Image (tube, rainbow, N blue to C red):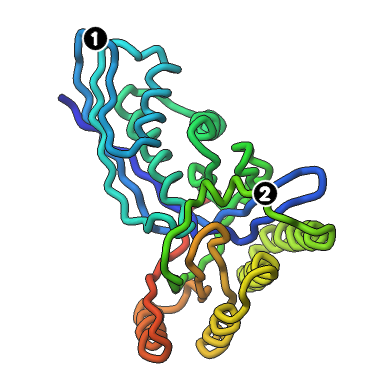
Amino acid sequence: MQSFLGKSYSSYGEIIQGILPDEGHFLVSLPINAWSKVKIKKSKINNLSVVDCPNIKTKLLCELLLEKNILNYGYHLSVSIDSQIPVGKGLSSSTADLNAAINAFSNAFDLDFSNKEKSSYMMKVEPHDPVHYKSCVLYRQKEGKLVTNYKYIPNFWIVSIDAGGVIDTVGEHNKNSFFSYEDINNYSSLLDDLSNAFKLKDDVKIASIATESLFLSTRYKSEKILKKYVLIAQRYHAMGIQHTHSGKCTGLLFSGELANEEIIHIQEDIFKSYGFCSKIYKTMKFNYD
């Protein structure tokens, strides 16, 4: 029996998520250093290929990979997941598991899948986030389609406050949310501003747009807790606030240039002052040269 490992980082919700005229639902991802790791133990058998995995989505994906790559005879795959990503919070935990599984499968059978192929496989399991792209990207999550690769990730620390409870994020994706004509125009304008901020690599502007997106996404929800988050952000001079639109977490955005000790102090002080438990994440960094 041989063992093969695959891993995937996650996305802290979305910098912006909404709907565009004539183009449908979209999101812009924010890759962070929270990881899912999948291990595949592969052994030969004289029978139809079998997948053992406690996670039904990952099991379905591995069965699909075997079938589509003409490997549906002769293999037993034992698949396990080791993830540090909170589930049901809007941090792409399910998609990260799927992406990690594809990477482990690729290693197990010496295959190379393009990002477009990964999108196609994952789309057969569920709507998903674009964690297989090493960048912030504009993505149509309900179609599994890349629109724009910005080839940039802002340098943020994220102090993530958990409002409690979990959400079925796939159920949230499948909801027919109401968007007014004004909403759609606002999202279109905000996305234009964000695209320009990415071109300029303007982290301050990106954080500001994330905050604007938060207000757009919560305009029909209770504003009581939102006002408290705004006050906290102002007190600690955060660059902005980012919401996991289909989850339960809200992140205070700080410059990635701050020292670890400064961020930990802010986290501890938020707990002492407001009673909010939080986690700290850092955005991913890749070389695009």
Q: Which residue is mark 2?
A: 176
> Is 29 located above or below residue 248 in the figure?
above
Residue 180, image x and y in percent?
Answer: 80, 59
5 relative position to 288: left or right: left
Q: Are marks 1 and 2 in contact (CB under 8 Å)?
A: no
Of residues 185 and 133, the one drawn nearer to the viewer in this rendering: 185
Residue 47 is marked as 1
Q: Does the image show residue 214?
A: yes
Label ID, residue 75: none
Identify the secondary structure beneath mark 2: loop
Q: Residue furthest top?
A: 46
Q: Is residue 175 above or below residue 2?
A: below
Instruction: Tell me residue 5's x, y (percent).
Output: 28, 37
Pinpoint residue 257: horizontal percent, then vertical percent: 47, 75
Q: Secondary structure at mark 1?
A: strand
Splitting the image into 4 quarters, where does residue 231 fall?
Answer: bottom right
Q: Residue at the location (54% across, 30% down)?
A: 120
| Percent position of residue 85, x then y | 36, 56
Q: Residue at x 75, y 63 (%)?
A: 190
Residue 205 visible in rendering = no
Q: Residues within 10 Å of mark 1 (few under 14, many from 20)?
A: few
Residue 222 lies, with reference to residue 193, above or below; the image says: below
Front residue of 128 and 145: 128
Give the amino acid type for the residue marked by disc 2 in the picture: Asn
Q: On the picture, is 175 further left or further right than 80?
A: right
Q: Residue at x 45, y 17 (%)?
A: 68
